[in-house]
Image (cartoon, rainbow, N blue to C red):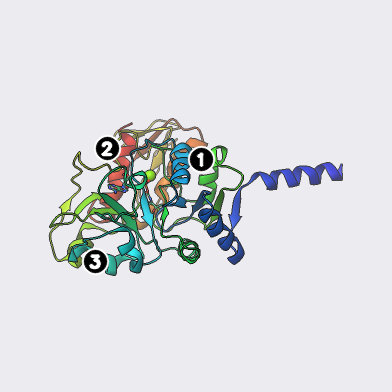
Amino acid sequence: MWRIFLYFGATITDMSIISECTASVLKDAASALKAGHLVAFPTETVYGLGVDAQNEAAVARIYKVKGRPKDHPLIVHISSIQNLDKWARQAPEYATNLAARFWPGPLTLILPKTDIAKDFITGGQGCVGIRVPDQSIAQALLKEFENRGGFGVAAPSANRFGKVSPTSAKDVEDELAEYLGDKDLILNGGICQVGLESTIIDCRSERPNILRPGAITKNMIEETAGIEVVAYSVNDQIKVSGVFKTHYAPKASIFLAGNPDKGDGFIALAKYNTPEGTIRLAAPKDHTQYAQQLYQALRLADQKMIKKIYVIPPYGEGLAIAINDRLNKAASK
Ligand code: TXA
Ligand code: MG
């Protein structure tokens, strides 16, 4: 009886492919990346599914694991602004200023690429997306990877294409474990601090163009760049998030207006009471918490097999813009 218990105990533990991040695990993870394996890792925004950005065969696996269209470009993650020149060129002054001010941080810059950024990273475009994440595990992993001769780690959010981005290692495991191989890894870094994907800025024109709103807000960008931005204008010449209808979507349907029925999910700031009979999925105190808890709440709805989620979106500028952007896309399924 005892042996059977131990046997099952061992089996259950072995089933999880999440690694706790000791210094030696981080070194192994960097070596795994260099050898062409996939490593999911925490960032301050969401978890990324990392791969050596120069390894074409390994990058091809990312598209398979995510179920993502092949021509959709990937963000390259580097450990510091010092490595920017390897991947990007002709950065306008405002882009260098933004990088100096907000890196490490939740900001991705789109810039003309160097020859190192191949078509399999850029989706065949002449530009590359670069980010320096502000998370200790991500930083350590990138530095170890660079110590092994790597130039950058391409990492989309570690979810299946069109689904909710993961903000915990368990989310990544639930979403991708069945598609990962024996030598791939998921690093545990707890819950992501920001909870929404980085702000993406196209820096190829005279004025910065926000392609995806995030925690680095329009005001913050304008203050640092000293130029008015072109906000949220995605043109069809650039392949970017959100042009697909089902982005950030849970299985449940999302409603941003109307009255919930008994058994429906409910998300709103804490100041709103829970309508009778509904299931409260999140009650954030402010917009920072709203961003941090939103994806967790959407996943919780699916786990509870809730079919409809009613949301009171946050009102205002700044981070509220990013939250509303994701809510609108999740609701337009
Ligand atoms: O916060 C984040 O940005 C997370 C973490 C892991 O860093 N990453 C992330 O990656 O959200 P992903 O692939 O899920 O979304 C990145 C978006 C994609 O929609 C892609 O089209 C756009 O960035 N992108 C990447 N490179 C680009 C490029 N060269 N030109 C235009 N858009 C690009
Ligand atoms: Mg994504």
Q: Which label was assigned to residue 96?
A: 3
Percent coordinates x, y for residue 52 in the rendering: 45, 53
Q: Nearer the viewer, residue 169 or 104?
A: 104
> How far apart in space, not on screen, are marks 2 and 3 (Cα)?
28 Å
| Foreground tag (3 vs 1) | 3
Percent coordinates x, y for residue 201 in the rendering: 24, 54
> How far apart in space, not on screen, are marks 1 and 2 (Cα)?
22 Å
> Residue beneath label 1, please?
175
Q: Secondary structure at mark 3?
A: helix
Residue for point 47% across, 63% down: 149
Mark 2 beta carbon near ligand 1 (under 8 Å): no
Q: Nearer the viewer, residue 104 or 115?
A: 115
Q: Is residue 213 visible?
A: no
| Residue 240 falls in image quadrant | top left
Percent coordinates x, y for residue 152 in the rendering: 41, 58
Percent coordinates x, y for residue 308 in the rendering: 40, 32
> Residue beneath label 2, please?
243
Question: At label 2, which amino acid type do we have?
Answer: Val
Question: At label 1, which amino acid type do we have?
Answer: Glu
Question: At label 3, which amino acid type do we have?
Answer: Thr
